[in-house]
Image (tube, grey):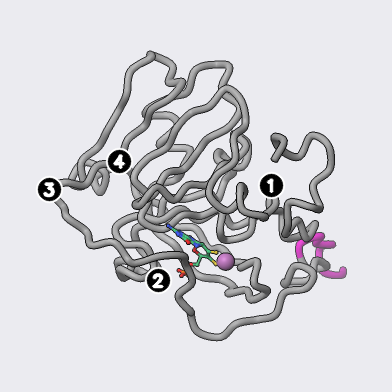
Amino acid sequence: MGEPHSREREQPELPPGQRLQRGWPVTHYGPVPRFKPERWDFRVFGATADGEKHSWDHEQFTALPYETVVADLHCVAKFSMLGAEWGGVLARTVLELAPPAPDVTHVMVWAEYGFSSNLRLADFTAEKTVFATHRAGEPLTAEHGFPVRLVVPHLYAWKGPKWVRGIEYMTADRRGFWEERGYHNIGDPWREQRYSYQEEPGDGPEL
Ligand SMILES: Nc1nc2c(c(=O)[nH]1)N[C@H]1C(S)=C(S)[C@@H](COP(=O)(O)O)O[C@H]1N2
Ligand SMILES: [Mo]
């Protein structure tokens, strides 16, 4: 008897054009925000099912169901970090607790200083999409997004804002911060969707 035929194992670990990065560099645009617990909240707004805004303060957010996910991070600058264990609140959990209206198709994830990234609803609800508070069992450091960052393992890492403050349910697609500035609207690393000039009709709103 041979090994079970696994499609997983035949896939290369690294998406095309990526190289393995040892360690965990810090990559972002702009300054690292200071966390002020008494002023922090996580908001859900836009096209919610009940038409209301929802929000959790820090204590409430950290009391939401905690799960861990093993996932890779692929930076569009061509380095990848493999197999990190992220802990936090699954995006699916947020969606169940504060559901979107039936006609919602996209989610804008908002972070400190107005940083944002747009996701298709299916990318947001993917199994491993997680609002991480921990990595390898330790709380995130400020540089890596404390108190909460999004990780969307199957997309380039800019789709995962650090210092997340909320999500907006949208009934049509709109570009986020990097998606307006030359990066691909979808950002699938396995298809090397790096830049907006590679977009095909239907991949994103007009620039
Ligand atoms: N708020 C915010 N989040 C961000 C970014 C950013 O500029 N601002 N950069 C993204 C990019 S391009 C990458 S590669 C990852 C890097 O995460 P790390 O610094 O924890 O390695 O964060 C992402 N999240
Ligand atoms: Mo990146």
The residue most toward the right is 1
- The residue wearing badge 3 is 38
Q: Earlier in the sequence, mark 1 or mark 4?
A: 4
Residue 39 in the image: above or below residue 10: above
Q: Secondary structure at mark 3?
A: helix
Quadrant location of the C terminus?
top right
Quadrant location of the N terminus?
bottom right
- The residue wearing badge 1 is 186
Q: Are marks 3 and 1 in contact (CB under 8 Å)?
A: no
What x and y, as percent, mark residue 102? 55, 16
What x and y, as percent, mark residue 149? 40, 56
Horizontal side of 169 relative to 183 (left or right) equals left
- The residue wearing badge 2 is 136
Labelled disc at residue 42: 4
Q: Residue at x 25, y 49 (%)?
A: 62
Q: CA distance from mark 3 to mark 1?
A: 35 Å
Between 24 and 161, the one nearer to me in the picture: 161
Residue type (three-letter) at the residue carrying disc 3: Glu
What x and y, as percent, mark residue 107? 53, 35
Q: Secondary structure at mark 2?
A: loop
Q: Secondary structure at mark 4?
A: strand
Residue type (three-letter) at the residue carrying disc 4: Phe
Look at the image and give the residue range highlighted in magenta: 1-8
Q: CA distance from mark 2 to mark 4?
A: 23 Å
Residue type (three-letter) at the residue carrying disc 2: Ala
